[in-house]
Amino acid sequence: MKVLFDTNVILDVLLQREPHLAASASLLSRAESGEITCALCATTVTTLYYLTAKAIGAAGATVHLRNLLSLCEVAPVHRPVLEKALDAGFSDFEDAVLHEAACQAASDAIVTRNAQHFKRAVLPVFTPEELLQVLVAQES
């Protein structure tokens, strides 16, 4: 299963944000083990660097992003993604871009803590806890 991770899920891990850390970290561990394929929207990468550098400094942000880039695929953001996002009817353009990048990158799902922002999504959208439940059920 290829899952595009929203920015907030990755930030929970990088910045150790409770109470969300455990579920988000567990999903990244599953990506490390090859159980799922992790994807990030290209715009997520720049946002992650900016916010992480503010919190822990540029050197730490660079280390974290290198690790993420070695683990995750990057869903490109180009003209077709942006044009489809403009027409997608989402209330938040950034979420629309993330969704369209996920679609173009052939992702199977999106994982986010803001599932309510993706009401118009054509892909399945899960919170980290919900996706963990799906993965555990598949193991049975």
Image (cartoon, rainbow, N blue to C red):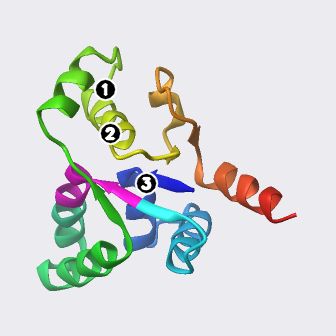
Q: Is residue 7 visible?
A: yes
Q: Which residues are magenta?
A: 39-47
Q: Label 3 amino acid?
A: Phe
* Residue for badge 3: 5
* Residue for badge 2: 104
Q: Earlier in the sequence, mark 2 or mark 1?
A: 1
Q: Label 1 amino acid?
A: Asp
Name the foreground residue: 34 vs 44.
34
Q: Quadrant of residue 138?
A: bottom right
Q: Residue furthest right?
A: 140
Q: Is residue 15 visible?
A: no
Task: Residue 76 in the image: state x and y as whole percent.
Answer: 21, 49
Q: Measure the alpha-carbon separation of dots 3 and 2.
A: 14 Å
Query: Residue 92 has which mark?
Result: 1
Which residue corresponds to the image point at 47% horizontal and 66% vertical from the top-left?
A: 17
Q: Earlier in the sequence, mark 3 or mark 2?
A: 3
Q: Helix, strand or loop at disc 1?
A: loop
Q: Nearer the viewer, mark 1 or mark 3?
A: 3
Which residue corresponds to the image point at 88% horizontal and 63% vertical from the top-left?
A: 140
Q: Nearer the viewer, mark 2 or mark 1?
A: 2
Q: Is residue 90 above or below residue 39?
A: above
Q: Quadrant of residue 139?
A: bottom right
Q: Label 2 amino acid?
A: Gln
Q: Nearer the viewer, mark 3 or mark 2?
A: 2
Q: Are marks 3 and 2 in contact (CB under 8 Å)?
A: no
Q: Quadrant of the N terminus?
A: bottom right
Question: How many residues crowd around disc 3 within 10 Å: few (fewer than 14), some, or many (20 or more)?
Answer: many
